[in-house]
Image: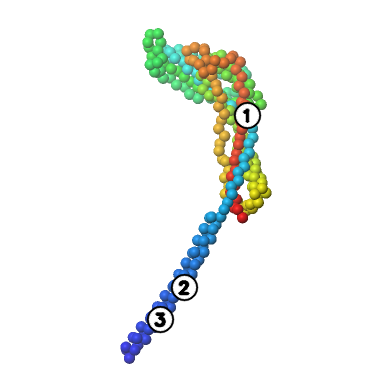
């Protein structure tokens, strides 16, 4: 009796195990089918052909801001006299430019340095000279309407002995506003290019898959300027320096690009 019960129990266990195995295999096969379908769908989606169209927009703008950096360098062996000389020249220069309408808010003393020079600067007694230097930064607004103050300040700098013009550059104050306008125009031009390609090639383009827009920053425009030798009144960069130097900001071309990637239907 016990043997019969054990045999019956063994048969029922085997039968139950077979059912479990069959159900497990069925679920596993269904999982493989679903996974294969998803992989195929994903692959088809990723491999879907696309076409890239580009658009650009440009605008010529007259810079409305200018920044001018002057330097004054004095060499000698008497620190007090050198500092007095520098102060006198700077004060005279600042007084002169204020008379032509340059406000104190536009002027910044960028640096002031008093150091021994290297051995290349010596006087008649073979003494190594000291070097006293200072920089003055002047900012201008509205130079797109009137650039004459820049030229006037440069001429006054030369006449007052400021012997190093370190840099002059122009910039556009409304870059963000102009950049936004050009981006919108570049995207419009890219869409027009898409319509043109559809018309000429017969290709139908669908959903936009990718958008890239130029977000670069417009750098300042640097102009060649002149530097006067500290020990003489002769120009060392350009021989065309005149007492009535004229500076024109010119125009800057601002450009933005847009790239649109479309799905090919």
Give above or below for 258 relative to 72. Answer: below
Q: Position of residue 183 (x, y in %)?
A: 62, 41
Front-most of residues 176 and 237: 237
Single out the mark in the foreground, 1 or 2: 2
Residue 164's x, y, as percent? 51, 19
Report the disc number at residue 15. 3
Q: Is residue 84 visible?
A: no
| Mark seen at residue 158 | none
Q: Observer-nearest residue: 144 or 22?
A: 22
Question: Which residue is tagged 2?
Answer: 26
> Residues at badges 2 and 3 in contact (C-beta under 8 Å)?
no
Mark toward the start of the polypeptide (3 vs 1) = 3
- Considering only vertical position in the picture, is 24 above or below 53? below
Quadrant of image for the N terminus: bottom left
- Residue extending furthest front? 201
Secondary structure beneath label 3: helix
Query: Of label 1 and label 2, which has the lower sequence position?
Result: 2
> Marks 3/1: CA distance?
90 Å
Q: Secondary structure at mark 1?
A: loop
The answer to whether residue 35 is above or below residue 14 is: above
Q: Quadrant of residue 154?
A: top right
Q: Looking at the image, which residue is at 65% across and 41% down? A: 185
Q: Extreme bottom residue here?
A: 1
The residue that disc 1 covers is: 251
Q: Nearer the viewer, residue 171 or 33?
A: 33
Residue 29 visible, this angle: yes
| Quarter occupied by residue 25 | bottom left
For image coordinates 60% across by 50% down, the residue present is 262
Q: Secondary structure at mark 2?
A: helix
Quadrant of the frame with the C terminus: bottom right
Percent x, y for residue 74? 46, 15
């Amino acid at each position: 009796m016990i043997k019969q019960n054990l045999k019956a129990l063994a048969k029922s266990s085997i039968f139950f195990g077979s059912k479990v195995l069959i159900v497990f295999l069925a679920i596993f096969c269904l999982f493989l089918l679903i996974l294969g379908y998803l992989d195929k769908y994903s692959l088809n989606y990723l491999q879907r052909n696309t076409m890239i169209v580009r658009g650009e927009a440009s605008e010529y703008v007259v810079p409305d801001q200018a920044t001018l950096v002057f330097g004054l360098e004095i060499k000698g062996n008497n620190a007090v006299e050198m500092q007095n000389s520098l102060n006198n020249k700077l004060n005279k220069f600042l007084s002169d430019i204020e008379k032509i309408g340059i406000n104190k808010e536009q002027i910044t003393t960028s640096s002031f340095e008093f150091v021994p020079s290297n051995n290349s600067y010596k006087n008649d007694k073979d003494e190594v000279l000291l070097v006293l230097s200072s920089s003055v930064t002047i900012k201008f607004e509205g130079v797109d309407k009137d650039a004459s103050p820049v030229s006037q300040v440069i001429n006054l700098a030369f006449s007052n002995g400021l012997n190093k013009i370190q840099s002059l550059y122009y910039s556009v104050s409304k870059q963000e506003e102009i950049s936004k306008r050009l981006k919108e125009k570049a995207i419009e031009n890219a869409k027009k290019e898409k319509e043109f390609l559809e018309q000429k090639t017969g290709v139908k383009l669908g959903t936009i898959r990718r958008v890239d827009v130029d977000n670069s920053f417009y750098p300042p425009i640097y102009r060649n300027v002149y530097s006067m030798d500290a020990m003489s009144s002769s120009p060392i960069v350009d021989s065309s320096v005149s007492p009535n130097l004229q500076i024109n900001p010119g125009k800057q071309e601002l450009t933005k690009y847009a790239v649109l990637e479309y799905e090919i239907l």
